[in-house]
Amino acid sequence: MDILKPVYEVDDYLTVLGTSFIPTYLVKGNDFVLLEGGLASMWNVVKEQLAEIKIDPGQIEYLVMLHSHLDHVGMARPFKKEFPNIRITGTKEIVGALECEVYSDAMKRMDASFEKIIGLKTPEKYIRLLNEKIHVETVLEEQEALDLGNGISLEVIKAPDRKSVV
């Protein structure tokens, strides 16, 4: 299995980016959304993939976090640093976790393990960002929809064994 698989366009509205081990999803309405934050080490790969499909990361309106695990939020810090207009988005359950959680020793070990598995290294210029808290600017409530235009929206639902997810 090729862990660094190429971009996969599901249809005109959904493209799979990232890696086969930790994917992230580009949803295209009138506004663009990146679902899942992946690992910080994936940031350069995702930027290259966006360039490949001719999407400027600055066009992405929202980075939606589905939950607060490290392998789902890692790109939030470098993305926000390079493209400050993106709105970090998640549910109220995610807000508390992301705004108080810093890059602990346990998280560093976990990130290092993932990096070995997928063969990517977090760029040095992002290492210092990993200790910054992630501020969620757009908070979605259960049953609330994020309207992307062009008939595309994302709705928050309650999933088994999880809190609310988008």
Image (cartoon, rainbow, N blue to C red):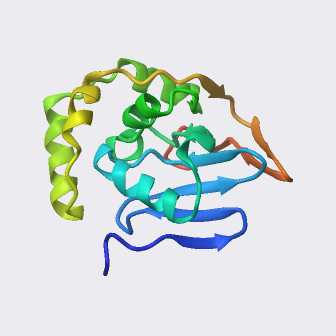
Give the percent coordinates (x, y) of residue 114: 22, 54
Q: Is residue 10 left or right of residue 46?
A: right
Q: Is residue 27 left or right of residue 118?
A: right
User: Residue 54 falls in which quadrant of the image?
Assistant: bottom right
Residue at x-position 50% and y-position 65%:
52
Q: Nearer the viewer, residue 108 or 128?
A: 128
Give the percent coordinates (x, y) of residue 122: 23, 45
Q: Is residue 124 left or right of residue 151?
A: left
Residue at x-position 38% and y-position 64%:
19
In this picture, is 20 found above or below 148? below
Q: Nearer the viewer, residue 160 or 69?
A: 69
Q: Is residue 165 visible?
A: no
User: Residue 99 falls in which quadrant of the image?
Assistant: top left
Give the percent coordinates (x, y) of residue 88: 54, 31
In this picture, is 6 found above or below 25? below
Q: In the rendered view of the protein, which quadrant contains the C terminus?
A: top right
Q: In the rendered view of the protein, which quadrant contains the N terminus?
A: bottom left
Residue at x-position 55% and y-position 39%:
63
In this picture, is 102 found above or below 18? above
- How many marks do you count on the picture? 0
In this picture, is 25 found above or below 161? below
Q: Is residue 31 left or right of residue 22?
A: right
Q: Is residue 2 visible?
A: yes
Q: Looking at this rendering, what residue extends furthest in the right direction?
A: 151
Q: Looking at this rendering, what residue extends furthest in the bottom direction?
A: 1
Residue at x-position 22% and y-position 57%:
120
